Image: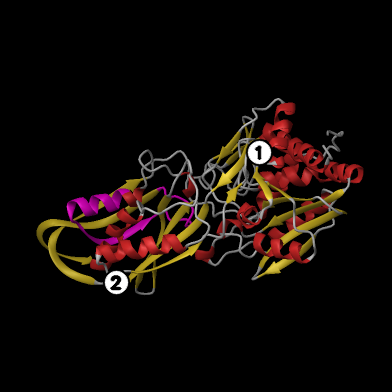
Amino acid sequence: MMLGWLGIDPLELLKRLIPLRCVNDPSGGIKPGSTCVEGVLDVMKRSGMDPKSIESNGFYTLFDIYGSGRPVVLYLAHYDVVPPGPSWSFDPFTPVEREGRLYGRGSADDLGNVASIASAYRDMTRIVDKLGGTLVVAFTGDEEIGGYNGARVLRDYLRNKALFPDFLVNGDGSGLVVINRRRSAFKIVIEADAARIKTKGSRKRVEKTLKSASYHAAYFISGSDVHPLIDLAREVSEQDLLLSSLGGDFVKSNVLPQRVWAEVIGEGADEQQADLSLTELVKALLPLTRISVELDFPSLYGVTATPNMYYMDGSKHVFEVDVRAPLKDSSKLERAVKNLLEDLSVRIRYRVSGGRGYLNTPRTSRIVTKSLRVLERMGLPAKVVEKAGASDSRYFSPEGVESIDFGPVGGNVHGYDEYVEIWSLERAKRFYIDILGELLSKE
């Protein structure tokens, strides 16, 4: 079903969203603030919504409910973005148009989807008026750190209001393809107290550089890409080096660092200082990033583990390892980490968190088959794919909600010079309008 569009431009909405600086960075104590939240609310109001908000631990979920009865279709996206990191060609929070692309932090992940869904809202309400059912549009503020105070809270709210969705169209995809499967996201934290020693040797500086098509941790391909910290761990282990210090372009636990540098101690006669704990932790990263776990279902991507954060917490060295795996909870991963570290006989403390579910919707489901019909009608490739990253679908798919992820075409997600292809914003908007008609129809 297709109705005439009401002419709200997703590009103009996106240009309003990027400057809001909706950064979510727990390591820096930063979460989307009042300027961000008020700005997103303004975009929702401009799009015709009468938004409400739910607050949980300082994070805000902004939503609108239109219509009544079944089915309930939830449109979801997130307005929080990762920190900009280094190496940008432009101010990351000033939208820049160039050669058909709009550059800016969040342009692809995930403000482009917020803009596309918001711009589709008035058309979607006309479909609800014609066909019945309930439309819920919600934008969350903590997807980048797991969604516990956003999508989870929204899920429970909708359940309590007898509005638990039948379908979820999650605007946190890319490529204008139907994403029906994603893995869970976990975090392994390993730490040890600093242990400085004096030793004999020669000191040198080692620098390692990321080689990857993406800066998003979920899209790292082991065996093809080169992670600077894993590469350092390999060299330290193979050459039996000691570490004296470590630094790098560490941004966030799910952002691959562009560079890592270290002072290492090799063979020699000069008196040097080294840190045994730092050395032990870095060496442990090599087997941790190759950890073997029994999976809940087959995945194109298997298990991805990348150590993306290092910092000192008082006198402790701390590393955060981002893990993506098709596991419903952390129990299997916890056992694997415990067994691995015990086998290494290292004095390392660890904890495992995350794993709140995954997206896994059958290709034969109504939402997937209807989505393919819409794409065919739009003249786009009708593709169903698995993607590497996690998303807020994890809070709905395991509970029986037919769910997909979708979104416009973009690149450099979580990296510098992030962009969205401008032409694809209107295509995403059209998809969001048309799939609602398909899901609400009696066919």
Q: What residue type is labelled 1?
A: Thr
Q: Which of 131 and 49 is in front in this view?
A: 131
- Residue 282 is situated, as x and y percent measured from the top left of the image, at 30, 59
State the mark number for residue 339.
Answer: none
Figure quadrant of the C terminus: top right
Q: Nearer the viewer, residue 154 or 373?
A: 373
Q: Which range of residues does the magenta coloring cover?
A: 231-258
Q: In which quarter of the image is residue 225?
A: top left
State the mark number for residue 194.
Answer: 2
**Residue that protrudes farthest toward the top in the picture:** 379
Q: Are discs 2 and 1 less than 8 Å apart at CB?
A: no
The residue where tag 1 is placed is 364
Any part of residue 11 in sight: yes
- The local crowd at label 1, few if under 14, some if 14 to 19, many if 20 or more residues have their Cα within 10 Å, is few
Residue at the image position 62 percent from the left and 29 percent from the top: 99
- Residue 128 is situated, as x and y percent measured from the top left of the image, at 87, 46
